[in-house]
Image: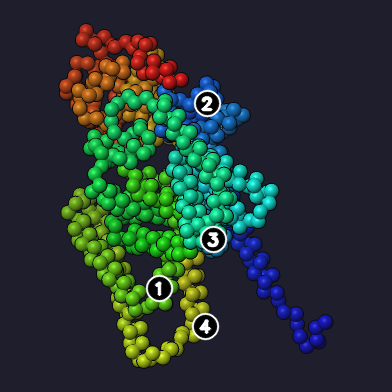
Amino acid sequence: MHSSGSLPQPDNSDLASRCVFIADVAVYAFILVAGIFEITHYTRSADFLEDAGYVDLAHSLFLQGSYQINFLPETTLPPGFAFLLALVGRFFGFTPAAFFPVIAVCATLGTVAAYELIRRVQGRGIAAVACLLFASSTTVFGYNTTGILPEMPYFLTSMLILLLALHIDAARLSKALIAWEFFFGALLALAVLIRSVGIALLIGLFMWSMVSWLSNHDAGIRRFRRFSIAIAFGLAAQLGWSFWAQRHQVLEWQLPGYPESYVSQLRVKDGNHPELGLARWSDIPLRVGENLVTRVFQDERILTGRYISDFWSSPAIAGVAILIIAGLASSFRAGGQLNDWYYLTYEGIFLLWPWKTEVRFLFPILPLACLYLWRGVQTLKTCLIRWPRPAGLCVTIMAGLLSASSGAFAFHLAPFLRDPGHVRADRVQPLAATLFWVIVAVSGLAWFGYHSLRDADTHGRVPERRTPQVRVNTEFALTSLAVALVALIVLQNTRQLIRRGQDNLHPNLTTQTTYPEIEAATWIRLHEPSDRVIMARLPEFIYHYTQRRVVWLPPIGSADVLMDGIQRLHVGVVVVVHHPTSYWIPPEEVCMQNLLQSYGRSFRLSHRGPSNWVYDVVSADGTSVANPSHSPIVSERAGAR
């Protein structure tokens, strides 16, 4: 009973629980709505307009029971994703309407799993920020609604593995735990077979258990016991796939790198320019530095949808990279969790990767990058409070160096640009970066000087601390500013995403980047004999539209080597496409120009379309080259099967 003069006090814990529940529901609702929008706004077309390799692999598994594409065994891409597509295709058909919802569902569930993971290891605030930015990203939406690629299924699988590892590690011994261990092992094997980089999960799991054993024997033994099944499953899946791929590999060209195994590709100097040969040890630091810069600024472009200049001393690159590294390092103070070791291994693989960084490879770890960025901010704050003088001095020195670099970049950029509009746009960010780093350097110096004077004045006495009210007000102001900024970014991303989705409902085929290949392949299917072997730079995509044997047009500058391959592989048609930027070096039109200069009489232009040329390979009397059914490639394929 309350006294007559008192009122019941509100239950603060109940109010906090309601706020937390509302926050969770709001995040889940946004992720769900974004996922539904992906399902309803994928690119509406009768056929696939982007990479259709996995679709054809799934079709091969379903119809022939063999893992092959373009009449050859597929030995580079693991079969997990194609197998999932084959299961879906069996019941719903091998159409865009059947496969795009699979990508959207995986993206939605993966984002929910990422939210639950980060919420458990760090808190709701950073979990909400990371997942709302990810779910509203126009770049992620673009990939999910235009191409059938394995990133989202792998994202879902990897987040479930990291989330389940926390549960298994903390659970008590029971029969249910054994079932969870087997399920965890099956998920790990599936992740390895969906994408080869899933090996990072396997390595991370082993390193986590090993370091735990070295620092805490009992904890290490417990983890080895609980995750031994998963390690065995994952290792068996990786070794089984590698053994099968090695036995069935058929190489059309003696060229380092692709399409050999990923381990072999790591050895080349430049994957996009394989004629440069193998890398030297001196090439590795430059490769790591370039990949680090590219990955960081692409992370931010994906999440914010804003143009960010890619000079390394930008606060958006150097500053963010330093904070992520600091946050990741702080996570290992107590040995780290599986997500820490996984992120380190995943990024380590791609920092050593000799190819141009593809944006889609960043998707599976973007929420984790946000986590370590936040931890880096916390680490910086802790250092400035606990060790103010050394931390202030380090900030001053580092910011001074970065400001000098940004200034040098700003004032030497203009001579290398031709478009005055680009000069103005590209100089703004370097100049702004210079000013930013100057302010940071001055602030660090002021922080160092203030605490030096304070320590001298107190003569060793404990100084007066800032009042709690001031600290609370400052933190509240900064938190409110951060929330407003994130909300603004999410709102702007959502507006762009809606416009992109509306464009997907009425796509213009002629504006697609692959339209030249589609137009050339359609012409070949209608006008060339069905027994002609085709040579093209995108063999799997041309195969999808022609259903004919397609040989890779390799990035080889030597006309003699190319002509030898044309004769050896019985090529009858050569497709050449011009794109503004070429993924391979030298571009295919350069390779064809070399052929025409040396063997012009062996080629006849049969068709010229939008940015494409189709050449018939002709004999000395001017007739087209026939393609015998006993082609050595077909014979090797039959033997491999």
Q: How crowded is mark 1: few (under 14 residues within 10 Å), some or many (20 or more)?
A: some
Q: Which of marks 2 and 1 is nearer the N terminus?
A: 2
On-image quarter of the N terminus: bottom right
Q: Distance between the residues labelled 3 and 2?
A: 40 Å
Q: Residue 61 carries which label?
A: 2
Q: How far apart are marks 4 and 3 (CA)?
A: 29 Å
Q: Which residue is drawn at 36% across and 87% down?
A: 455
- Amino acid type of the residue that numbered disc 4 sits on in the rendered structure: Gln
Q: Which residue is drawn at 55% across and 54% down?
A: 221
Residue 232 place in picture, x, y as percent:
53, 42
Residue 187 in the figure: left or right of residue 342? right
- Amino acid type of the residue that numbered disc 3 sits on in the rendered structure: Val
Q: Which residue is the site of mark 1?
A: 383
Mark 1 secondary-structure assignment:
helix
Q: Distance between the residues labelled 4 and 2?
A: 66 Å
Q: Residues within 10 Å of mark 2 (few under 14, many from 20)?
A: many
* Location of residue 329 (image quadrant): bottom left
Asked whether the residues under the numbered discs 3 and 1 touch, taking CB atoms below 8 Å apart as contact, a structural biologist would say: no
Residue 409 in the figure: left or right of residue 115? left
Task: Please tell me which residue lies in front, 54 or 300.
Answer: 54
* Location of residue 571 (image quadrant): top left
Q: Which residue is the site of mark 4?
A: 469
Mark 4 secondary-structure assignment:
helix
- Amino acid type of the residue that numbered disc 2 sits on in the rendered structure: Leu
